[in-house]
Image (cartoon, grey):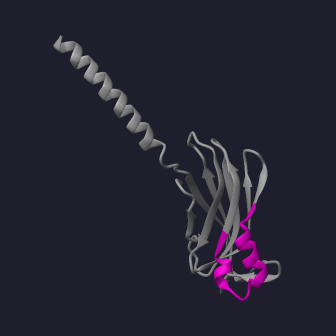
Amino acid sequence: MESIYNYIGTYVAGVISSHLWEKFIHRLTILRFTVSSVPIGISAENPAFGKVEIKHNNQSVNNLYFTTVRILNETSRDISNVEIEIGCDSQGIILVSQAMNLTSTKYIYFTDKYSKMLTDNKPDDSLSVLRFRDYSIPVLNRGHIIEISMLIDSVVRTQPMITVGCDHLGV
């Protein structure tokens, strides 16, 4: 009789543990991301090779990098209305950026707040506007990949430091 109570107790403890574990696992959604930067060109002056100047839209730039941020939803949950913040360190300026859902081939656009800030401020007036981007992702289904491509001008000859943030509840 005692062994039956042990089996029942073990079964009940297992059910409770399983339920609590499921609650714990599904309380947060972790989105994985990768950042990669490739140098495109470096402006420099060298006595042996002469002056090398890199331009973007006829404007001289220091050190040009092509940077890609990939955000992957490897969870078992679909997420809606996600806002992603991309930031660049104080040594860099994001010249241009574009975001796309690679799985559905749909473009991702700036948040309304960021778009308004761009129209209210001329980019030359505020360096902080040029150091970050806010994107609004209407739906991020499981298995989807978001890719954000950027051209970054860096004052120093090191790879730009990129930060990725999300203030969505549970992410």
Please tell me whether residue 9 is drawn above or below residue 109 in the rendered image. Answer: above
Could you tell me which quadrant the N terminus lies in?
top left
Q: Name the residue located 23 percent from the left edge and 13 percent from the top edge.
A: 4
Q: Is residue 4 left or right of residue 150?
A: left
Quadrant of the rendered image containing residue 134: bottom right
Magenta region, residue range: 109-133
Q: Name the residue located 44 percent from the left edge and 41 percent from the top edge.
A: 23
Please tell me whether residue 155 is drawn above or below residue 113 in the rendered image. Answer: below
Q: Is residue 29 found inside the magenta-colored segment of the image?
A: no
Q: Is residue 29 left or right of residue 117?
A: left
Camera-side residue of 72 and 139:
139
Q: Residue furthest right?
A: 58
Q: Is residue 113 found inside the magenta-colored segment of the image?
A: yes
Camera-side residue of 141 and 153:
141
Q: Is residue 57 left or right of residue 77?
A: right
Q: Position of residue 160 (x, y in %)?
A: 58, 71
Quadrant of the rendered image containing residue 70: bottom right
Whether residue 126 appears in this view of the structure is yes
- Image label count: 0
Q: Position of residue 110 (x, y in %)?
A: 73, 66
Q: Is residue 103 left or right of residue 18?
A: right
Q: Position of residue 93 (x, y in %)?
A: 66, 78
Q: Position of residue 77 (x, y in %)?
A: 59, 42
Q: Name the residue located 83 percent from the left edge and 81 percent from the top edge.
A: 58
Whether residue 96 appears in this view of the structure is no
Could you tell me which quadrant the C terminus lies in?
bottom right
